[in-house]
Structure formats: C-alpha cells, structure tokens
Image: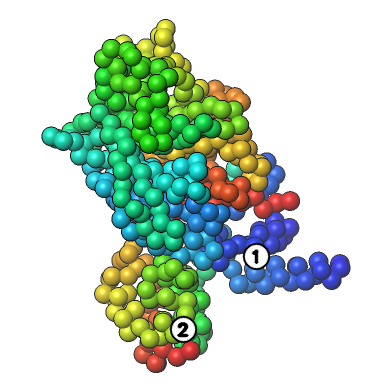
Amino acid sequence: MKIIITLLLAALTLTASATPVMHFKAQGRDHVVERLTQGHGSIWGLEFITKDLIIFTLKEGGIKLLDLRNGAVKTLTNPPPSISYGQGGLLDIALHPKFDKNRWVYVTYARRGVSNGAGTALARARLDAGNTGFGPWEEIFIAKNLGSGGLHFGSRIAFDKDGYLYMSMGERGQGELAQKLNVHNGKVVRLFDDGRVPQDNPFVGTAGALPEIWSYGHRNPQGLFYDRQSDKLYEQEHGPQGGDEINLVEKGKNYGWPVITYGEQYGGGPIGNGETARSGMEQPLKYFRPSIAPSGLMIYRGSKVRLFTDKFVSGSLALQHLNLVSVDEPSRACEDRLLVGLNDRFRDVKQGPDGLPYVSTDDGNIYRIREVSP
Amino acid sequence: MSLPIRLLALAAIGALLAVACTHTAPTARVRHPASLDGAYEACEQIPEVMYEAPRVNYGTLTRSYANVRDHVFKQHCSSCHFGAEAYAPRLDLYETASAQAGEILRAVEGGTMPPSAPLTQRQAEAVAFLRSWVAEGASR
C-alpha cells in the first residue's frame, strides 16, 4: 500500500503530457517510467534547448520540438539536407556550448557522395528566436567515409569544455579502412565549432593522414560522450557479434578494429587472426558479450535517480533495453538492463536540465525515468 | 493521522481511481538472431511492472466534449494536437474541436489519423465514441 501511495503521489506531480507506463524497484527504491511523446519515426538524437523544450531528429528526416509543459510537438521548418540510405539518415543533434547566445544547432547525417555511394556529414544552422525553424544549413565537415552499402554511418557529436567539437563516424562496412589514416571511415574527428582543423590534432603534418582525425580503429560508433566531471571523452561502438565496446578516447590512439576485437563473424568464426590484444592498440573499458547493439551513451552524473549515478547509460537496440555499467569499474562482469518490458529499441540518452534521464527510441517514443521513493 | 496527511492520502486514493492502472507482466522480447545472445550477470535484481491504460467503458459516459477530450483526444491525440503550438486542429479547446468535428472524424475513419493507423481495438472503441458525439451535434 505504501508503494502504491508513493507512486500515486509521484503521479500527482507529473506534467500534463507524461503518461506512466512502467515502474520498477531497485536498491530498495521505486522508479516510474513516463512516456512523454509517441507516434514519431525513429528518434535518433535529442537535446534540451530549454528546461521545457526537447529538440529531436528523426532518422527519416526532419527535426521536431516537444514542449514538456503540454506535450505539444511541432515540426521545425527548413530541416537539414539528409538522405535515407540504409542505416543512414538524419542522425545526431547537438547544441553549441553557447547556444543561448548564438543559437547554433549541429547535426550529422547521411549524405550522398559526389560520384556514388554515401558518407556522413556535419552541418550547423541557427534556430530562430521563435523556435519555428532553421536558417540556412552550413555543411562544415563532409567525411571521406564513402561506401556503397547501407551500413555503419555512426554517428554522434560531443563538445568538450574548451569548445572543441568531436564527431564519430562508422567505417561504412569496410573494416580495413578503419586502420587507414587517409580516409575517415571508423574515426573520431576533432574540429573547431566552424569546421576548421585545430593544429594540435595528432595527425596534422603527418604525410598521407587526414588532419581532422583524433582517434581511429573504430567500427560503428553510435555513442560519444564528453564527461565534464572527469574531462574525458568516451565512445561506444557496435562491434561484430559479441564485440560491442565502450572506449576511453584519447588523442591519436588506435582502438583496433578490425585487427583486434572480442567479437566474431556473424554466424561464428574468427575475425582476422582472432586477436583480442596487440601492442599499440587500445583495449575497451568494457565489451559486451552478448552484443547489445548500443547507440546513445552518457554518464549520468545526477543524483535524482541514484541507481544511475556514476554509470554509463546506453540504449540497446537489438536487445531492447537501457544498459547501466559502472564508470568506476567498467570491466566488472555485471551490468544492469532496464525497461525490458517496453519492447522498444533505445536510441539516444540524455540527462535533462531537471537532472532526470531521458531516452528516445526507434518506435518514436521519448521516456523519462524518475525515482519516486523518499 | 493529521489532517494534511489525511488529505494527502485522499488525494492519492483519488488519483488511484482516476488513473486506475492495471499491472501486467512484461511481454516477451524479440531478440536479434545474430546478437550471440546468452546469459549476462545482473548487478541488481530489478523487477519491472507494466502499466496499461485503463479500458474506458464508453457506454457509461455522456457524449460531451469534456468526455471526448479526456477519454479520446487526451489518450490518443494529445501529443500533436494539444497546446498552443499544436498542429491544427487543436483538440484541447472546445471551439476548434467542435468546429472541425466532421473533418476530425473523417480523418480518423479514413485512416489518415492517427499516423500509427490501423487502429487498435481500444482506439476503435474511442472512435466509436467520437462518432456518436459528432452525430449528436458535438455539444459542449
């Protein structure tokens, strides 16, 4: 009875548009999961432009705005020039660190190559003051990661404390290119906010290497998170069968794909020589076996949902759950899987200005998680 | 029990009646065949309980805008059609909802709305109630 009353008291405080869909108990505390919107396409990325307004991308194209005060959703005018191309489409969205002053919004998306195939691009535009739509889009980085297939575009965007922009992109199904420094397949790049290349990037001045590259040897990084508390950049990528990874990304380092991996060929059998470690290549902080097919990544540094505090929180697509891994002990064997009963593919995760975790899904839902016990 | 606590408890019971959530077991997950699925070690035991929206007994409701708003529009249309920045027609206002009641019904019956059509059983029941409200003049 106490639990029911607690949950109901929490329900009394819900915003008008929040619908409770699940509750779960962990560490002796009750939690409620609220659905804030539904019925959209695949919500690939989301950000808060104010404490009440969530801006989100749809993989099929288009950017929408959700008003948490009443649940209203509107489509913003002049969307980015994305194309739908296999796993590619309109992908991540991020705000400039000084968005409140300059209104710059950044997106990544699939873009057709000049002659054939498609790769990943980064563009920015200003959101108008009335939050109705965007000014002209400025493509500030067009990755040289073309491929004709529909696999592995990445991608995510993260800004660090100094305002540098990091973008991850996939190897487009061409694993060997992740080890080549003359292409952007399977790389994390580091740029100024207008697309220029910082001269202290690790491969500036290296013959045959692209100067934007910050790290390499990635497969399909759909998670990228800068942790302000630790001043570290983390990346999460889809591995092959049994080889998804969380990595600490550092300047100039090689994360090994496809030379080393804890995964294997789909259907079984080693990849390459079946190596899991080699000198000069980084080990993941955590690898997932079985694969969870991870997408958005964050470290939850809030205190309002204590189960999440100081944990990697990531969406799982194939195994359809929200995944929690300890930041302090990432290689610990255990992990937690939440929201299993919702039967949804969890695509992006964000900590809201209210300190609560928010999650978007491929079925067009946005959920929020609250702790409701005292 | 002090008065504030009693009032709080009454509010909670009222909310229980209003929300009337039912608990159901989570349904089975669909797993990707190539995920090398298997056991994993959980750090915590986290039992989940699903809410399911209450089934509305439309036969007991008066065919008023207030009931259509609360039991049809709010349940199935509010994410796009409620609020100052909503898509037209706004359904949280009697004036706009009643003025376009015929068009709303045609959009629903024609499969244009909601975008997730075809309708579920519960949505079909809601449409039947909407239809009867429109047929009786879409009154306040």
Is disc 1 placed on a helix, strand or loop? helix
Q: Which mark is residue B94?
A: 2
- Residue A254 in percent (x, y) is at 39, 16
In the depicted view, which residue is nearer to us: A287 or A114?
Answer: A114
Crowding near the residue tagged with mark 1, few <14, some 14–19, many ≥20 C-alpha atoms within 10 Å: few
- Residue A43 in percent (x, y) is at 39, 50
- Residue A272 in percent (x, y) is at 29, 14
Where A261 sits versus A246, above or below?
Answer: above
Residue at image location 51% in from the left, 49% down from the top? A100
Question: Of the residues shown, which amino acid type is indicated by label 1?
Answer: Leu
Chain for disc number 1: A
Q: Which residue is mark 1?
A: A12
Q: The N terminus of chain B is located in which quarter? A: bottom right
Q: Is residue A7 visible?
A: yes
Where B139 sits versus A374, above or below?
Answer: below
Crowding near the residue tagged with mark 2, few <14, some 14–19, many ≥20 C-alpha atoms within 10 Å: some
